[in-house]
């Protein structure tokens, strides 16, 4: 219920166990995001939702995601494929408020199960799909649809990555261009969602204070992930990451 969710979020105070668990979850998520270029939101929200409500988990993840994605994008800013980005952002802009509305209205148990099923579904598709690289001209209509799906998932669960990953990583582009382009979408997702969620009361002062304690772990872990990604091939680890995501999704469904 909207009122119940708002009360639960408002009652969240400086709980040091919450801060400690947030540092651990966001540290792992940031390393994954820095190393592979995606998956930070899935890891953070899934882990935190095992301990707290989905609303609490998405609020903290949203604040931290702004810092995380902006930091990664700044390092890759010269590699962005801007022609691919604009239709994706247009789709995201239309649906992020709808996702936030769903989270505000849904029961926590329902939100948790829907989120778990989405993670499992996208993990299965990614594991079963062949690694095909698409060439040819970019068509705006499919990109807008991908962006709209991503925006809806991001608004509801702060994990709009899977549709973007499937679309952007299928393009025949250099590795840094792929990572940079998807980070632009993540930054827009995070900042826009933060404004919408803040406007409806999801982001509170305790959330912001907790995020401040988490920021050092975010920068250290994401930097370590990016440094490692320059020394080893990341492609073999992507399939392993999706297996872990599927397990997290299953845990959310049965919790």
Image: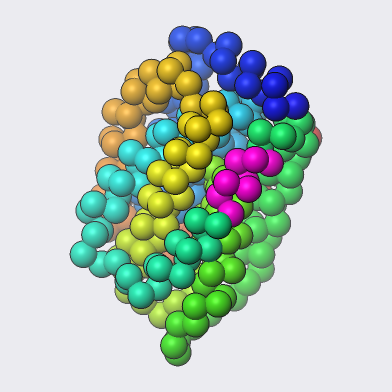
Per the rendered image, the range of residues in magenta is 95-102
Secondary structure character of the magenta stretch overall: helix
Q: Nearer the viewer, residue 247 or 201?
A: 201
Residue 135 image point, x, y percent: 45, 86
Residue 59 image point, x, y percent: 52, 30
Left or right of 64? Residue 155 is right
Residue 151 image point, x, y percent: 55, 54
Q: Does the magenta stretch include residue 199?
A: no
Q: Nearer the viewer, residue 178 or 194?
A: 194
Where the N terminus falls, by quadrant?
Answer: top right
Left or right of 224? Residue 154 is right
Q: Nearer the viewer, residue 176 or 199?
A: 199
Left or right of 66? Residue 76 is left
Q: Which residue is drawn at 36% across and 64% down?
A: 181
Q: Which residue is drawn at 40% across and 68% down?
A: 86
Where the C terminus falls, by quadrant?
Answer: top right
Look at the image and tell me whether residue 55 can be seen: yes
Residue 253 image point, x, y percent: 76, 39
Q: Is residue 100 magenta?
A: yes
Q: Residue at x 40, y 34 (%)?
A: 64
Left or right of 111? Residue 155 is left
Q: Which residue is drawn at 70% across and 27% down?
A: 2
């Amino acid at each position: 219920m909207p009122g119940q969710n708002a009360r639960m979020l408002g009652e969240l105070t400086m709980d040091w166990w919450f801060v400690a668990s947030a540092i651990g979850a966001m540290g792992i998520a940031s390393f994954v995001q820095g190393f592979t270029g995606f998956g930070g939101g899935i890891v953070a929200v899934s882990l935190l939702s095992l301990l707290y409500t989905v609303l609490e988990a998405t609020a903290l993840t949203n604040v931290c995601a702004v810092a995380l994605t902006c930091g990664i994008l700044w390092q890759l800013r010269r590699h962005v494929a801007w022609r691919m980005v604009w239709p994706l952002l247009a789709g995201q802009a239309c649906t992020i408020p709808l996702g936030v509305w769903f989270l505000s209205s849904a029961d926590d148990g329902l939100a948790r199960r829907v989120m778990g099923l989405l993670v499992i579904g996208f993990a299965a598709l990614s594991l079963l799909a062949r690694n095909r690289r698409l060439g040819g001209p970019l068509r705006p209509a499919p990109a807008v649809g991908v962006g709209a799906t991503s925006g809806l998932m991001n608004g509801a669960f702060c994990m709009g990555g899977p549709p973007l990953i499937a679309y952007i990583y299928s393009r025949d582009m250099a590795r840094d261009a792929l990572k940079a382009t998807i980070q632009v979408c993540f930054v827009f997702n995070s900042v826009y969602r933060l404004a919408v969620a803040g406007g409806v009361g999801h982001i509170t002062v305790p959330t912001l204070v907790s995020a401040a304690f988490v920021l050092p772990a975010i920068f250290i872990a994401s930097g370590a992930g990016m440094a490692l990604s320059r020394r080893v091939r990341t492609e073999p680890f992507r399939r392993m990451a999706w297996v872990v995501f599927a397990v997290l999704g299953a845990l959310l469904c049965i919790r």
